[in-house]
Amino acid sequence: MLTILSTVSCSKDGGEAVSVSLSPSALNAPHSLSNQSMEVQSNGEWTIRILSADGLDVTWAKSNREEGSGNAKVTIRVFQNEYRDSRSAKVTVTSATGETASIDLIQEGNPDVTTGLSELTFRIGTYNL
């Protein structure tokens, strides 16, 4: 099933805004190194960023391009997850006139990680926590 997320509006100066849309509606990556593909549909120039929930660029996923014009296939390289927990980010494309479209990037946790923080035993003095 192909779902397209799009945003279209007029620019502040009354001219036509540059529209942008993305497909698919989400990217789901395995815990191992992988490449995820997405399509950008636009009638102008755009930039792309991959951001964490706190608005910072993530280090575990990289786009093969930071900007483009018109329609384009974009590949997101997702590096191996070294942690048991899944992680997520937003892939956001912003048009030259400020219109945005975003999709979720979710990477599964690594089932091969056997020691998580919840499984550790800490010793303080003679007490086990």
Image (cartoon, rainbow, N blue to C red):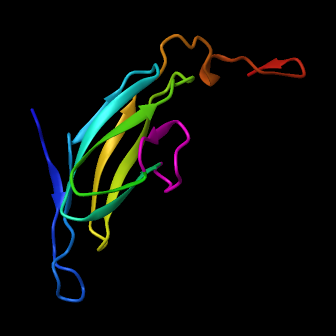
Between residues 46 and 111, which one lies in front from this camera angle?
Answer: 46
The residue located at (11%, 37%) in the rendering is 2
In magenta segment, residue 96? no
Residue range (magenta): 52-65
Which residue extends farthest left? 1
Q: Split into 4 quadrants, where in the image is the N terminus? A: top left
Decide: is 61 above or below 129: below
Q: Position of residue 86 (x, y in %)?
A: 45, 29
Towards the viewer: 45 or 76:
45
Percent position (x, y) of residue 25? Answer: 21, 42
* Residue extending farthest bottom: 13
Quadrant of res 126: top right
Q: Specify whether 114 is left or right of 106.
A: right
Res. 80 in view = yes
Identity of the residue drawn at 12% across and 42% down: 3
- Residue at 57 percent across and 23 percent down: it is 82
Report if residue 108 is visible in the image: no
Task: Left or right? Give the position of 76 relative to 127.
Answer: left
Q: Position of residue 74 (x, y in %)?
A: 32, 42
Give the position of the C terminus as an image quadrant. Answer: top right
